[in-house]
Image (cartoon, coloured by chain):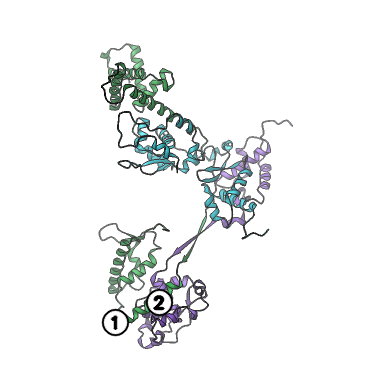
Chain colours: A green, B purple, C cyan
Amino acid sequence: MGDETDPTADPTVSDRLAAEALIIDVDGYEGPLDLLLSLSRTQKVDLRKISVLELAEQYLAFVTQAKMLRIELAADYLVMAAWLAFLKSRLLLPPDPEAEGPSAEELAAHLAFQLERLQAMREAATRLMARDQLGRDFFARGETEGIARIRETSYDVSLLDLMQAYARIRTRDEFRPYAFDRKNLFTMEQALERMRGVVGFAGEWTDLSTYLPDGWGTEPKRRRSATAATFAASLELAKQGQIEIRQQDTFAPIAIRARSLPRGH
Amino acid sequence: MTMPFDIPPMGEQERMVEAMLFASARPLTLREMEKRMPQGCDAAEALAALRQRYEGRGVQITRVGEGWAFRTAPDLGFLMQQQIAEQKKLSRAAIETLAIVAYHQPVTRAEIEEIRGVAVSRGTIDQLLELEWIRFGRRRMTPGRPVTFVVTEEFLDHFGLESARDLPGLKELRAAGLLDNRPMPGILRSEEEPGAKGQSEMFEE
Amino acid sequence: MTMPFDIPPMGEQERMVEAMLFASARPLTLREMEKRMPQGCDAAEALAALRQRYEGRGVQITRVGEGWAFRTAPDLGFLMQQQIAEQKKLSRAAIETLAIVAYHQPVTRAEIEEIRGVAVSRGTIDQLLELEWIRFGRRRMTPGRPVTFVVTEEFLDHFGLESARDLPGLKELRAAGLLDNRPMPGILRSEEEPGAKGQSEMFEE
């Protein structure tokens, strides 16, 4: 760092050494507050009884020295210097009863508080790291046994559901006026029914085409009808919030997955 | 009773073996343990004492190859399984299909489709078979000899029925006009059915 | 001696808790254990008996947040030295940030920066999140709705703490007002919450 010093500044050798020591340290500081905390230690008093005035002078002296040695100080160090210079002048002058805002004493007390708090957190951090630590001082079970998860699905269907379903079919039958060729037509309603039944199992993204009903995937006419109906049904299910749809790119395969709904009410 | 070095008392050695076996990701041999313990320790003796201590406990020290390891007591294996009960709604297609099988059994797939007015997907039938609510009945003695479906004991159990004939509400449904008195679709089948072919391909896969 | 159901005797329940805790590396709550035990079991009572049984042994039952876990006794750490996984050195910034989150939680990033007097780099927070020692807490109900950070159960587990209340020196720090989030006098900090609030909600959950 010596080569960065300006010979024309002409400080005495001991001054320069002291300043350099300070500057070498500056790299290690994490900012003005860190530096202030470090400076405050030279006062060797309880942080609660620290002289903020003295501290401000120390800090300003540090900044001046750094400037003399043409050390680039980060902006926040200079901001702090300006603020401390202001605080110092306020502390030295008799209080102005007209002045608005906090008194110099309040500002000084806050700075002292900040320093004390930072110091307290540092000590807390040291104490924390000094504790026995898992994987270093004490250990968990090395060879764990997993829990085999056995899924037991039960279906929630009552006799009433069954009867109502049957009644629904039978009454619908009577009003069915005309039986169209359903051989090659897969309706959205069918697709919806089909998908409602199976979509619950799709936790992962699954290509929509895998939801085409068996026997509808090869013959073009049937495939078209089934694809259109399945797509329309998936839109409907997405609208109802039961599934999510995604398409990675234009014309890319469309994928769906079940949306996990919160259970219960 | 003078000891050459400060050999830890046996109780301490036992603790050491306990901790090592616990924390190790694989079984440890006596040699491996002794190497880690202070000089003069007797891992074998400590292990023997420790094994005794764990006798009848929830975990036991068992020999695995050349080494030793903690293992869950065999009778507690059930704790290492977690039953996840899931309640699911049956799809409308499945409920309807099931209802048709219950009311019309024995019934063929083509008949189910005729009654529902829509195709019955393989998945729906499979699901009901898997739930053991329906099973295959006798083949119909019609061209193509299609299989029929009937409901199972499990079905009756689940819905609290003595027999499918007792399906409560069948008469009531009919009385309410919800069921017409047409002959069972099965009887119509032979004329109407494009199905003979359809059925044979249906269960071939 | 009739029991309503076949509730296993307490000795058996103790074995069950022992087996479950042994098999798991992560702490288990009483609820989790009871769910796996036969109906009518009292995991809390079984655990209490078991804890006593393991007192002074090579492995111990420790409380971690809501859960319980077996851990080797700290004085035997030397036996496991070989097993110590490479621990990434935490930077001073990370260690201090961690302490601030632990003692001030829930705490916003702005508050951490205010306390340390310097900006907190993204990497520091990321590292602590990755270690799963901190996690996002609730958003602060102040303008901008900043996220807060809190420590996790993994943090408690790692440092052998039963709860965040047991952080060393917490009471003294709080009594000295050093956990206050005091704003600079004269500065109306509308974007942040005025002090004491954070403290009162700190350990409520």
- Residue occupying the point 38% across, 33% down: C181
Q: The disc labelled 2 sits on which kind of residue? A: Tyr
Q: Quadrant of the N terminus of chain B?
A: top right
Q: Is residue A122 left or right of residue A80?
A: right
Find residue B79 and report its horizontal and vertical position in percent: 56, 55
Quarter of the view holding residue C7 = bottom right
Residue positioned 34% across, 62% down in the render: A207
The label on residue A177 is 1
Q: Nearer the viewer, residue A114 or A248?
A: A114
Dot 2: element: helix
For the C terminus of chain B, the quadrant is bottom left
Give x and y (percent) for residue B104: 44, 81
Marks 1 and 2 share the same chain: yes
Q: Is residue C31 left or right of residue B109?
A: right
Residue at coordinates 59% horizontally, 54% vertically from top-left?
A: C41
Q: Which residue is mark 2?
A: A166
Secondary structure of the residue carrying tag 1 is loop
Disc 1 marks which amino acid?
Pro
Choose the circle earlier in sequence order: 1 or 2: 2
Q: Position of residue A146 (x, y in %)?
A: 52, 53
Q: Nearer the viewer, residue C13 or A25?
A: C13
Label 1 crowd (10 A; few <14 / some 14-19 / many >=20): few
Q: Is residue A9 left or right of residue A26?
A: left
Say if residue A203 shows up in the picture.
yes
Q: CA distance from mark 1 to mark 2?
A: 19 Å
Quadrant in the rendering for residue C202: top left
Position in image of residue A159 (x %, y %): 46, 73
Examine the rendering and report whether any part of residue B147 can be seen. Answer: no
In the picture, residue B203 is in which quadrant? bottom left
- Chain letter, disc 2 residue: A
Badge 1: chain ID:
A
